[in-house]
Amino acid sequence: MAELNEGSSGGYREEAPRVAGVRAGLFGVGPVGARWDAGVRSVAAFVLPAVLVVVTGHPGAAFFVSFGAFAVLYGEGRPYRVRWAVVLAAGAGLLAATGIGALLGEVLAGSGIVARALEFGVLVVLAVVAVYVFDAARLGPPGALFFVLVCSGAATAVAGGVPGTTILACTALGVGGSLLASMAGALRDPQRPERMAVETAVRAVDAYTAAHAQGVATTVGRHTAGDAITNAWAALYDSGPVDREPRSRLVDQLLTAHHELSTLPQDDPAELTEGQRFPLARPALGYRLRRPLSWDAHAVITAVRVGIACALAGLVGGLLGSARPHWALLAALIVLQAGPNRIQGQVRAIQRLAGTAVGLGVFALLMQLSPTGYALIAVFALLLFGIELFVANNYAIAAVFITPVALFAGGAATSTEPLTTLMSDRLIETAVGVLVALFALHFVLTHAHRRTFTWTENRIRSAALTLVDTLRTHPVDTTNTELRRDLQYELTGGMRAALDSLHNDPEWTQPRWPRHASLIREGYDLLAACWTVPTGERLPDPDGWARRFRPV
């Protein structure tokens, strides 16, 4: 383990946390109770418009509604005031990806090497762009996969004779169903998303406070509490102005928790005062997309690795003579899209392969039953519910449900090929994809996490020194809230980079962990000092603060 290090914040000692192994990740299944609501929404987003498609006389096209129904997944956890816009934006992206796929399908109808090369080129570019956007903007799950999936699915279906206009119309209906399903909860409990975010923040602060009282506080715990506070503020801003009068109970709860976290090291913390008590939420999307434009940034490294792996997986699949080598591309994307460390990547790869094998058995059973119309809708609804229930808890179980959905959506149900051929191709292509993804994790940009580790340290120092230099001549007030917000954003990135590096390369990371953790603690202490300085007053001892962040 790493050497112990005296931190300047709170006087506690710290070492790098232990890293869980592959086995722990493979067999762990988290609680699924919290996912029931999301599962019901995913089902409703598909079922309502799919029934409409069947009623209007197009039972064979009902499952294409799922292309647009995936949009509901992107609004999970967002306050209702902005959720509709998030779902609509995701729906527009899915509709655009479907349209691109439909155009590709027209080209693929003529087959040939040029047509296949064009298909792979488009899918790889789409994967790279989508992965960069999701990683850079820290948008979280479900990530880039569904945009590439619907594009390839539409291409295959159109090449097989399904009219592109039918697929686009069904996708649009699915987007409409997503909007209705995602917003329905506002009628019952309009404040639930922001309330959950505030409750999570309060629990994180309470946990850190208890650890601090016992002398076992760590920078990881401090980061967890700070990140939860930031996410809660973002949720409250998304739900409306936080400084309106009278203030909501949730704003007061979060103010209290934020103040408690900021004044924790003090024996006699100051009272919470009015004025600049409302930190800004997350940076704007444009800032988040521009910030990681560096070869050392996690988003760029992940996008490059995905591009190489997807292209290689598709090439290997094609060389093996598969009629659907894009399945290998999708398998590689699933493993790599979140930019996982090597341990998490191995877990995801093994779970993907195992889940696919079982899912193929489910698909074979469904093919024997040959559901159509309302029966097909019911089957799809159950599969979508299973995906949502387990995708965040155990991917092997989720892949059992994902596999038949992907096969149906990709036109496998209407294929004239023997079922055994379809199943063997799927299993082989999945194996190719996950093996190529594992190769990319270990041998493509092998030490990139080290560069990201150092790059985030430099970003933290730069953001902190910029803030301190501003506060030399300006009081702590609303004119420098953006600088404090940007420092918080860099601190979050620094901790994520440290944990990623620890999983990828513990021997290299552990000796560097104390210094990195100390830098992050100093950043949080600076933010806490700004929080507790009375409005209109200067930051005490700016020279001392500047010395803490200058490179050694």
Image (cartoon, rainbow, N blue to C red):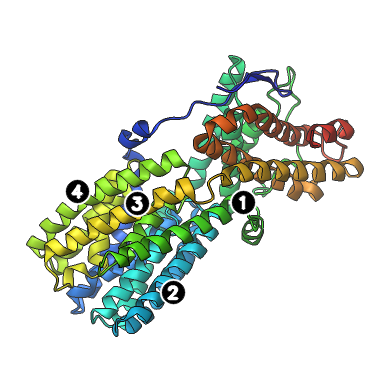
Question: Residues at badges 2 and 3 in contact (C-beta under 8 Å)?
Answer: no
Residues under labels 1 and 2: Cα distance? 28 Å
State the residue position of label 4: 358
Q: Which mark is residue 258?
A: none
Q: Is residue 12 above or below residue 182?
A: above
Q: Secondary structure at mark 4?
A: helix
Q: CA distance from mark 3 to mark 4?
A: 16 Å
Image location (x, y in percent) of residue 500: 53, 39
Mark 2 sits on what residue?
Answer: 96
Q: In the rendered structure, which disc, 1 or 3, sits on the residue that comes first in sequence?
A: 1
> Could you classify mark 1 by the number of other residues whose Cα lies within 10 Å: few (under 14), some (14-19), or many (20 or more)?
many
**Residue farthest along the front direction in this orientation:** 319
* Residue visible at 46% across and 47% down in the picture: 441
Residue type at the position of mark 3: Val
Does dot 2 land on a helix, a strand or a loop? helix
**CA gap, disc 4 and disc 2:** 32 Å
- Which residue matches tag 1? 297
Left or right: residue 457 compared with residue 71: right
**Image quadrant where one finds the N terminus:** top right
Q: Amino acid at mark 2?
A: Ala
